[in-house]
Amino acid sequence: MKLEIWLTCFLSSWIFSLSPGAGSVFSMTNGLNHGFRRGYFGVFGLILGLWVVFLAVVVGLGALIKASPLAFNLLKWAGVGYLFYLGFKQWTSKGSPISVRREDGSQVGLMALISKGAALNVVNPKGYIFMLAVIPQFIDYNTPLRGQYVAIALTFAFTDLVVMAGYTGLAAKALTYLKTEAQMRILNKVFGGLFMVAAAVLATFHQVH
C-alpha cells in the first residue's frame, strides 16, 4: 500500500472512530459501570466485531446486505433490538457505586464485556455499508490484496482502540465524583437513554441504492 493511500485510510479511520454512535456510548457506559481497566475490555469486543464486519465485506457479505432489503432489514432490526435491550438494562440498573460492586462480586465478566462489544458492531448495518463504501478506495487491485487488507484492518483497529480508550477513561473519571447511589442512578438513566436514542436513530436508517 502506497504511503499517500495509507494516510488517507488513516484519516478516514479517525473520522469513523470519532463519529458519535453506539460504540462511544457503549465505551462510556463500561467506564461508568466498571472503571477504566475492566471497562476497556469492552473495546476489545468492539474491535473483534469490527474485524468480523471487515471480513464479511471482503468476502462479499457486505454487498449482499447492501443489495438485499431483507438481509439489510433483518440486521437493522436486530441492531435496534440489541441497542434497546442495552439501554433498558442500563436504565433500570440499581446504581450501586463501583466500590460496592467490587466487594459483592457482582461485576460483569470480562468475556461478557467482550462479547457485548463484538455483538454491538456485528449487528449494526451502518458498519457494513461504511466499510463497503470505503475499503475499495484504498485497494490497489494490481498488487497482492492480503497485505493491503491487513493494513486497513489494523489501522481501523488502532484508531478505535485509542478513541474508545478516551471515551472509557472519560466516563471512568466521573466515578471519582459519584458518591451516592442516587447520582449513579441518574447517570445510568442518561446512558440508558443514549442507547435508546441510538436505537431510534438506527431504526430510521434506510438502504441506499
Image (tube, helix red, strand yellow):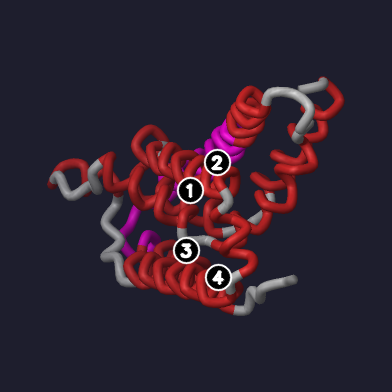
Residue 144 versus residue 159: which sits nearer the camera? Answer: 144
Q: Which residue is mark 4?
A: 72
- Under mark 1, the amino acid is Ser
Residue 171 showing in the rendered view: no
State the residue in front, 110 or 180. 110
Asked if labels 2 and 3 touch by Cβ distance under 8 angstroms, the answer is no
* Total labels drawn: 4
Earlier in the chain: of badge 2 and badge 4, it is: 4
Mark 1, secondary structure of its residue: helix
Nearer the observer: mark 2 or 4; the answer is 4
Please state, as top left, top right, bottom left or bottom right, where the C terminus lies in the image: bottom right
Q: Position of residue 124 (x, y in %)?
A: 52, 61
Secondary element at tag 2? helix
Mark 1 vs 2: CB contact within 8 A: yes
Disc 4/disc 3 C-alpha distance (Å): 27 Å
Residue bearing mark 3 = 191
Q: CA distance from mark 2 to mark 4?
A: 27 Å
Of label 1 and label 2, which has the lower sequence position? 1
Residue carrying label 1: 27
Q: Position of residue 81 (x, y in %)?
A: 41, 73
What's the CA distance linking mark 1 and mark 4?
25 Å
Q: CA distance from mark 1 to mark 2?
A: 6 Å
Label 3, label 1: how far apart the Cα atoms are: 11 Å
